[in-house]
Amino acid sequence: MLRHLFTLIWNRKRANLLLISEVFFSFVVLFGVGAVLITVGKNYFTPHGFNYEDVWRLEVRAGQGLKMPRAELDDVVRQVKALPGVRTVALTSGNLPFIFNTNNSAFAYKGKKSPPTNYYDADDHYLEATQLHLREGRWFTQTDDGSNHRPVVITQDLREILFGDEPALGKIFTFSEPGPNIKPEDEFQVMGVVDNVNMESDFSAPIPAMWKRLIPYDTTHWETASMLVRVAPGEGGVLQEKIARTVAGVTRQWTTEVRVVNDDRLHRRMFTLVPVVGLCIMGLFLIINVALGLFGVLWYNISQRRAEIGLRRAMGATGAGIGWQFLGEMMVVTTFGVVLGAVLAAQFPLLNAFDLPAEPYLLAIGAAALAVYLITALCAWQPSRLAAGIQPAVALREE
């Protein structure tokens, strides 16, 4: 039977070439959309690695042409922390969770180089504010004040990249291109390891990260200070207003912005979701057009082959047999298109395209193949029924 189907397909190779092309492009579109959706879905269900609930971001900016002395900034932190409803305040760098601000670089240890890695400044209270999960070692403490190297905490993925199976605690690494004169603050000593984190968006993959300890007693003058404030559950606008008034009480020359981190997350989610939804709509539109094209081509093929169908029926072929013949032809033609599409799609995991693992691509290939077979079967079902219902006398009389 299969050999017979191949013979019929070869005899109509010009017409079937169009069908194979349509199936091929359908597979490619479904593969692309599927790879995006699988990757986005997997990232969505991956834990963020920290607790953003009941966390606010507080950004304080000096006036035009002014800077903030560290002593006054520390006074702001103490007064905000003393407010009822505030659990803790952590001073950090400007690349706060879920906002469009990143600091990244590559790091190296004994010839091993990391991919672009996010790095943050963090004080001794950052762990309490974000509730990161420590896997090894500890967070920063006052005992690190006299350290000869910059104390850091790294994520598990960065630990595996730089140190592999070796112990990581106490190891010292540097920037991948540190320059000729390496300063002690550019040599990073691992104090602890935390779970992988995703501070970009709900649909982003975890990125290797590192937190550098902010030296508590330096004399730096800052233009902008960023803080994470963990508050008691249920706190809202009243406490935000108190925080703004507290900062203004230290100096009215500074401006204050208080935002809920979860609101930033939802905003970033919508910003990321829009292009994904647009891609899905465009893919759905293309698939509908391809499906309509397949349906029309199959319908035309049946009208052109009425004499063949009538002759087969006259020689004893059943209506069900004719229907299954047409459906089988379409499945074989579909297989040619799917194989060609799979060969193209297989290049993506082989070439490590877009720095994605092979798993989403392989799942997308399987999902696209299944969807193409389903679409083809649905498009071929009604024309096959039509072919099965043709009576031999009617078909031969028309000829």
Image (tube, grey):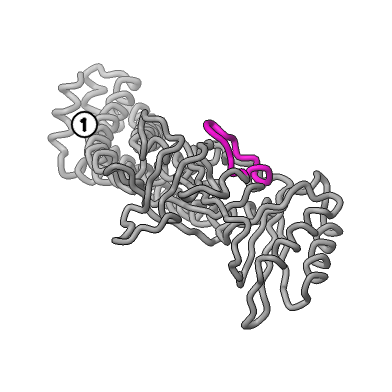
Spot occupied by residue 32 in the image (x, y as percentages of width and height):
37, 46
Spot occupied by residue 66 in the image (x, y as percentages of width and height):
64, 79
Q: Is residue 268 visible?
A: no
Q: Residue at x 24, y 30 (%)?
A: 332
Q: Residue at x 46, y 35 (%)?
A: 169
Along the line of sight, which residue is nearer the eye, 235 or 170?
170
Question: Which segment is the magenta one?
Answer: 127-141
Q: Residue at x 13, y 34 (%)?
A: 10
Spot occupied by residue 334 in the image (x, y as percentages of width and height):
28, 35
The answer to if 181 sits in the magenta stretch is no
Q: Residue at x 29, y 37 (%)?
A: 302
Along the line of sight, which residue is nearer the eye, 3 or 101?
101
Q: Is residue 323 visible?
A: yes
Up-down relation of residue 320 to residue 182 (above or below): above
Q: Going by the image, does 329 lie left or right of 133?
A: left
Task: Give the residue number, with chain letter if any, for mark 1.
Answer: 308
Toward the front, the furthest residue is 146
